[in-house]
Image (cartoon, rainbow, N blue to C red):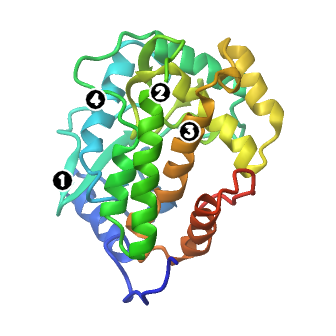
């Protein structure tokens, strides 16, 4: 039932508003925003500053702007422990606050044109999980950001809101009953191949919005669900599982983790629906599939 209400033009995260934020942050720290390119915008608006070796990220939800603090802490922790990952621009009081928007500024890793292999992702996750968890990173509460996005939705039918909140409560109860076989670790939280950049010095992790201390099993779920929901080649996940040394699909708690991942994949765009109307059709499809219990229908990725 998404789209029942006709939205007014624009929105909190419409392109003109985001461009203004980038211009303002660049002016404040002495960077040239001319010809900045918006690379993508789902959870965050990611701008490449064409005239600087820098990437600017704007958090795409006012309710989740707090996560930028975690992103900064995790990025600094990974740098301290030598885990291959994107690095923050130094000597800035990050995250920056620009008119209520949370902004982070990063050294650009120029892609070489290649795509990371699942085995390389397994190695990166192994390095991240082996690093001692930082004391100031939050514990894994996987449905908190789902509820925050529901609360921050630019437009959402009340019946859809009730359905999503009821589903969160059901999945959360099932989650409490799980016994995880792997030890807790600092987890990436959204570990898929799109969150690995292959640069001149090799592959590095990026996008730490969902990072936390939690079950290592969680970082194996995105590729498994990517096969089941998006039709990704099956060998992507099997190569990841082999490289990591654990197959989360063989564990009886996988169905619960899959349900959590699907809720995240569905609700990730709720705060920007009015600003980015192109996501509406796919959001409606996912909501309908969850509501009617269709676990294997194919989804298209948000663009």
Whether residue 202 sits left or right of residue 105 in the image: it is: right
Residue drawn at x 26%, y 59% as measured from the top left: 62
Mark with earlier residue (3, 1): 1
Q: Nearer the viewer, mark 1 or mark 4?
A: 4
Marks 3 and 2, how far apart in space? 10 Å
Give the mark nearest the N terminus, 2 or 1. 2
- The span from disc 3 to disc 1 (Cα, nearest Å) is 24 Å
Relative to 203, 22 lies left or right: left
Disc 4 target residue: 138
Residue in view at x 68 percent, y 11 percent: 245
* Residue 211 numbered tag: none
Q: Which comes sooner in the sequence, label 4 or label 2?
A: 2
Residue visible at 47% across and 52% down?
167
Could you say which quadrant of the image residue 200 lies in?
top right
User: Which residue is more in the foreground, 302 or 6?
Assistant: 6
> What's the CA distance linking mark 4 and mark 3?
21 Å
Tag 3 and tag 2, C-beta contact below 8 Å = no
Nearer-N-terminus badge (4/3): 4
User: Which circle's residue, 1 or 4, is located before the other in the chain?
Assistant: 1
Q: Which residue is mark 3?
A: 195
Sequence-wise, the earlier of marks 3 and 2 is 2
Sort mark 2 into few (<14), some (14-19) or many (20+) by Cα contacts within 10 Å. many
Q: Which residue is painted at 47% across and 86% down in the image?
A: 4
Check disc 1 and report the residue beneath it: 97
Marks 1 and 4, how far apart at CA: 21 Å
Residue 85: assigned label: 2
Q: Residues within 10 Å of mark 3 (few under 14, many from 20)?
A: some
Residue 224, position as x, y percentages in the image: 69, 35
Q: Where residue 135 appears, x then y in whole percent?
A: 24, 17
Q: Are marks 4 and 2 in contact (CB under 8 Å)?
A: no
């Amino acid at each position: 039932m998404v789209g029942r209400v006709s939205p007014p033009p624009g929105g909190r995260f419409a392109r003109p508003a985001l461009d203004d934020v980038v211009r303002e942050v660049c002016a404040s720290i002495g960077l040239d925003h001319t010809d900045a390119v918006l690379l993508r915008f789902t959870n965050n608006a990611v701008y490449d500053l064409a005239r600087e070796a820098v990437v600017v990220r704007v958090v795409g939800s006012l309710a989740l702007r707090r996560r930028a603090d975690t992103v900064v802490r995790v990025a600094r922790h990974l740098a301290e422990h030598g885990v291959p990952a994107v690095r923050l621009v130094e000597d800035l009081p990050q995250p920056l606050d620009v008119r209520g928007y949370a902004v982070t500024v990063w050294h650009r890793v120029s892609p070489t044109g290649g795509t990371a292999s699942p085995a390389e992702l397994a190695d990166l996750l192994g390095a991240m999980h082996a690093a001692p968890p930082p004391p100031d990173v939050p514990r894994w509460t996987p449905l908190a950001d789902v509820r925050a996005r529901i609360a921050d939705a630019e437009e959402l039918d009340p019946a859809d809101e009730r359905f999503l909140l009821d589903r969160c409560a059901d999945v959360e109860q099932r989650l409490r009953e799980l016994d995880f076989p792997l030890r807790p670790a600092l987890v990436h939280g959204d570990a898929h191949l799109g969150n690995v950049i292959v640069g001149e010095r090799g592959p590095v992790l990026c996008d730490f919005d969902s990072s936390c201390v939690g079950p290592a099993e969680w970082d194996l779920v995105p590729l498994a669900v990517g096969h089941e929901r998006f039709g990704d080649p099956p060998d992507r996940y099997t190569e990841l599982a082999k490289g990591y040394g654990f197959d989360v699909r063989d564990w009886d708690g996988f169905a619960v983790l899959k349900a959590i991942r699907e809720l995240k994949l569905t609700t990730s765009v709720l705060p920007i629906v009015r600003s980015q109307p192109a996501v509406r059709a796919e959001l409606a499809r996912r909501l309908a599939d969850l509501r009617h219990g269709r676990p294997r229908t194919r989804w298209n990725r948000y663009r």
